Image (cartoon, helix red, strand yellow):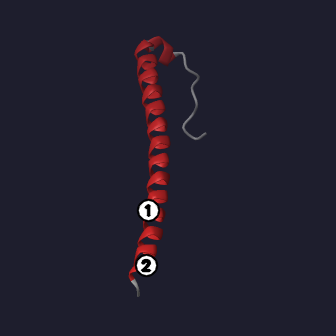
Amino acid sequence: MSIEDRITELEIRLTHQESVIDDLNSTLYEQWQVIESQQKEIIALKQRLKTFTQSDIDDAPYVPPHY
């Protein structure tokens, strides 16, 4: 294998690795956006749960356990 062939092979590998890294970076960014959104939803749900009183819970419709 000549030097030129080896350099070409290395360039091909580098290009492939750069593409993979870009794809992984994009995926990571998308997942981070989802995580942030879910964190905000959890905070909102926690705040909403804090506003419930015992009477709100007692007034909820009763569903028998067999349903």
| Circle 2 residue | 4
Q: Residue 63, image x and y in percent?
A: 58, 31
Q: Secondary structure at mark 2?
A: helix
Q: CA distance from mark 2 to mark 1?
A: 20 Å
Three-letter residue code for mark 1: Gln
Q: Residues within 10 Å of mark 2 (few under 14, many from 20)?
A: few
57 relative to 33, above or below: above
- From this view, report whether residue 22 is shown above or below residue 16: above
Q: Quadrant of the N terminus?
A: bottom left
**Tag 1 secondary structure:** helix
In the rendered image, the vertical position of residue 44 relative to residue 22, given as above or below: above
Residue at image location 43% in from the left, 19% down from the top? 49
Q: Position of residue 55 (x, y in %)?
A: 47, 11
In primary-sequence order, the first of circles 2 and 1 is 2
Residue at (46% x, 33% y) in the render: 38
Q: Amino acid at mark 2?
A: Glu
For the C terminus, give its image quadrant.
top right
Q: Quadrant of residue 17?
A: bottom left
Residue 52's x, y, as percent?
45, 14
Residue where numbered disc 1 is placed: 17
Of badges 2 and 1, the one in the foreground is: 2
Residue 38: which disc?
A: none
Q: Are marks 2 and 1 in contact (CB under 8 Å)?
A: no
Give how far across and how far down residue 24 sits, in percent: 45, 53
